[in-house]
Image (tube, rainbow, N blue to C red):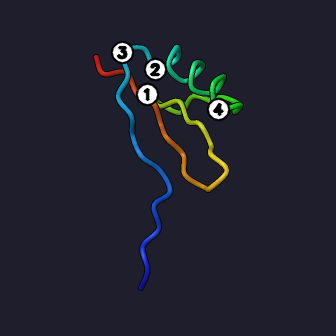
């Protein structure tokens, strides 16, 4: 059986601001907020999900 890494949670001081910055730098679009998470879909299938660290 193989394992696949497809998402990770990233703690941020301000998840909206951090997601917007990262999306701008990487040329991505910010995904729709889901609960406390804001996802960014990368081209390799991994989705960092930003969450407020507060």
Give the residue number, with chain letter if any, for mark 3.
Answer: 13
Mark pair 4, 2: CA separation: 16 Å
Q: Nearer the viewer, mark 4 or mark 3?
A: 4
Q: Position of residue 52 (x, y in %)?
A: 37, 21
Q: Look at mark 4 in the image and give the residue it sits on.
A: 26
Q: Which residue is mark 2?
A: 15
Q: Earlier in the sequence, mark 2 or mark 1?
A: 2
Q: Is residue 25 left or right of residue 8?
A: right
Name, please, the residue furthest toward the left: 54
Q: Confirm or deny contact between disc 4 and disc 3 (CB under 8 A).
A: no
- Mark 4 vs mark 2, foreground winner is 4
Q: Quadrant of the N terminus?
A: bottom left
Asked whether disc 4 touches disc 2, contact meaning CB atoms under 8 Å apart, the reply is no
Residue at horizontal 39%, vertical 34%? 10
Identify which residue is drawn at 55% across, 24% down: 19
Looking at marks 4 and 2 on the same chain, the residue that comes earlier in the sequence is marked by: 2
Relative to 53, 14 lies left or right: right
User: Above or below — where is 10 with respect to 44?
Assistant: above
What is the tally of numbered marks visible in this picture?
4
Closer mark to the observer between disc 1 and disc 3: 3
Q: Tell me where residue 27 appears, x and y as whole percent.
A: 71, 31
Give how far apart the Cα atoms at labels 4 and 1 are: 22 Å
CA neighbours of label 2 inside 10 A, class few (<14), some (14 to 19), many (20+): many
Confirm or deny contact between disc 2 and disc 1 (CB under 8 A): yes
Secondary structure under tag 3 reads loop
Residue 34: image location, x then y, percent:
53, 33
Q: Position of residue 13 (x, y in %)?
A: 36, 15
User: Alpha-carbon distance for marks 4 and 3?
Assistant: 19 Å
Q: First in sequence: mark 4 or mark 3? A: 3
Residue carrying label 1: 36
**Which residue lies at the image location 45% right of the left edge and 30% below the top edge?**
50
Q: Is residue 42 above or below residue 13?
A: below
């Amino acid at each position: 059986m193989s394992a696949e890494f497809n998402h990770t949670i990233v703690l941020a001081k301000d998840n909206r601001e951090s997601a917007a910055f990262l999306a701008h730098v990487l040329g991505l679009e910010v995904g729709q907020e889901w609960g406390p998470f804001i996802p960014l879909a990368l081209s390799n299938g991994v989705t960092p999900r930003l969450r407020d660290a507060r």
